[in-house]
Image (tube, grey):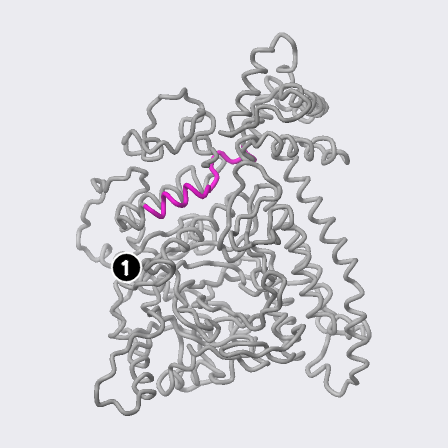
Amino acid sequence: MPFKKISLSSQQIPPVSRLLTHNLTPDPIAKSPGSFMKLLHESPSLQRRARLLDSSAHFSYVMPLPLPFPFRIDFPDDVQDKKGFIEAWLGHKEALELVETEKVSASTEKEEGAIQLRKFTSDERIQERQLLGLSPACLKDCFPALDTGDALDVIGSPLLTAKNSLKDDKPKENNESDRFSTLAGQEILDILSGHTILASFPENAPEEGYAPWSLRYSGHQFGQWAGQLGDGRAISILEVANAESPTGAYEMQLKGAGRTPFSRSADGLAVVRSSVREYLCAEAMHALGVPTTRSLALTHLPTLPVLRERVEKAAIVTRVAPSFIRIGSFQALNPPEQMFFLGGGQQSADLDALRILGEYTAKHVLRLDVEEGKPWAKALLMDCARRNALMVAGWQVYGFMHGVINTDNVSIMGLTIDYGPFAFMDVYDSAHICNHSDDTGRYSFKLQPTMIIFALRALLSALAPVIGAENSTGAAAAAAWHKDIAEEDLSAWTKDGLSIQQEMESYIMTEFLNEYNKLMRKRLGLRTEREDDFKEIIEPFLGILEQRELDYSAAFRALSRFTPQLLQSAYSLQFEMFLQSLDATSQCAKPDESTEAPAELWRRWLQKFADRIEEEADEWKEHDVDWLKAREKYMLSANPRFVLRQWVLEEVIKKVEADVVSGRRVLAKVLQLQMASRPFDSWGAEDQEIGEEISDEEGNSGLWWQNEGLLGPHPHFRVMVRIK
């Protein structure tokens, strides 16, 4: 049954009892949406000043406002009160004007007591804005009823040609239905670019309502305590009810939408380059089956300059998750140490705020099966440990390197979050470091599971006194649970809570190894489980890849073509060709630096692999005709043909930066059709001979991937080669 399409401003938000901003504690400078509106009129700069929030606060209300920072203000010569002038200048740009518009699309029937959102903007928000991307997969999974109007038409059909071919973009008739469609598309652009704000400021109930917010959190960065961090350039704008979500809702967050109280000395902005990377990678990770935040949209602010190593153009990525709460959210409320410096530092602990966050997370985010009034802290810790163990197993199996696994970048839900200097493995190197600023290799590929354990230790440290207290009483920590408790008792509870560290770490490793081996067996086309698979099959295979400097993903894809009969003497020529296909996954395979010839090295491992395959013949008995062909198909479905390589990202970014109109069609192609969102499909002449012409869906031959020599030297791996 198709969904009735609803405009973005009319989406159904969850019940008030489940909203983050109605369960957690706001920054005391604006304790409600009503007082936040008052602040915007009287002292709007407060929401953007770098400062330490009160120790009880979990978040701060803040409006999206993408502007250069430091603010570029031309003071009149006769201005005496510069501070007042700044407040007025900002106030005129705040979204305080109610937008009265025609009906965009159908609206939902609001439940009694449900919050009715309205649109707000400012006449001085004149920033040019363009829609670069909209993810059909994210729309389908997270917002199936969202009316996007003509947004996808504006982007244009996915196309890999470098030239601006718009022959299919025909003008529409200006009738009423198209007009409504256009309004829905314009609303998508206006809201997701930070131009228009969704909020509710009821005059008769100032303590109620709804407004955008940014989360407070702290964390360890490269192993060192960094104090308060928080959403320095991310602002959550909306929660949309969805029964299919793990939390019953999906949260929309704008990354790059301007300064917040957590921006320190930064501008709160993002550039096209970093935004394209996150937009594509989040959806690529989801398609691989790795837990992740999602990407809904990418907008461009072409007239907003952003100073990085060079002057770049601003962009905003709309990312989506059931929740953006992190391990650092808990650390902020029970930190390992205090500190203070200009614009930042770390507050003292607030153990009741810790309880409030924990209860909300256990009940509404993780939805733990815990009876009312029963202990929740240990269950929360172990569930977070399990989720992150499964996540990092997916990273290791598919060769993903995060680059910055600081504790503030680790999701409480076990989602891959904050795509910064990430990379997918090219030539296999277990010690590879994808972050150039990681001088010590702390976040190298092989150490990623260890760094997740470090993050979970930090969560345990924050929750330890609650765990100990609940162990002591057998009940959930009550309001003001730590008041009037002797210091020695609190220390004893903390020590008791910390005593489960080994149990937690053993649990993480067990969950990680089980998931890792399960996923690796699938990549190897193995259906049954043997205890020695890692030692006898998986580890030696990775060793050969590393020794021979072979491409990680392409080698798995090539292995899909292997059958045990290739080891028979009658198939010696085919076996040699198969080995050549493996070596062809690298442009720099070592000739021979081992004591063993490459063919013998492979033959020894392939014999064990062949024996393991033939052991499972009965598992494929439903495929009587050609079970090996069925097995090959199964293996191909677990080994991606397309991997989001660095050079692919660089080429897409270059196209988008050079020309938005054609570039966003390239972006759409890489996101949607048989690429990032369908990585396991065969495409790009995988089964054709070199030199055969490739045509896209519009009949344009000679794609720019091929024209610019980016498809590589081998027919099986044209999109999977190492770029030196």
Please say whether residue 279 is one of the residues in the magenta stretch. no
Please say whether residue 643 is one of the residues in the magenta stretch. yes
At a point 72% along the width and 23% down the height, the residue shown is 615
Query: Which residue is at the front of the view, 690 or 531?
Result: 690
Q: Looking at this view, name the residue that lies furthest to the bottom.
A: 80
The spot of residue 711 in percent (x, y) is 40, 31
Q: Is residue 613 visible?
A: no
Mark 1: give few (<14), some (14-19) or many (20+) Cα within 10 Å. Answer: some
Boundaries of the magenta span: 637-654
The spot of residue 496 in percent (x, y) is 81, 70
Q: Looking at this view, name the residue that lies furthest to the top.
A: 570
The spot of residue 279 in percent (x, y) is 42, 52
At a point 54% along the width and 33% down the height, the residue shown is 551
Q: Amino acid at mark 1?
A: Pro
Question: In the rendered view, would you say 263 is above or below 300?
Answer: below
Question: In the rendered view, would you say 548 is above or below 449?
Answer: above
At a point 32% along the width and 35% down the height, the residue shown is 704
> Position of 78 compared to 4: left or right?
left
Per the image, the residue denoted by label 1 is 302
Query: Which residue is at the front of the view, 47 or 296?
Result: 47
The spot of residue 417 in percent (x, y) is 53, 57
> Position of 577 compared to 460: left or right?
left
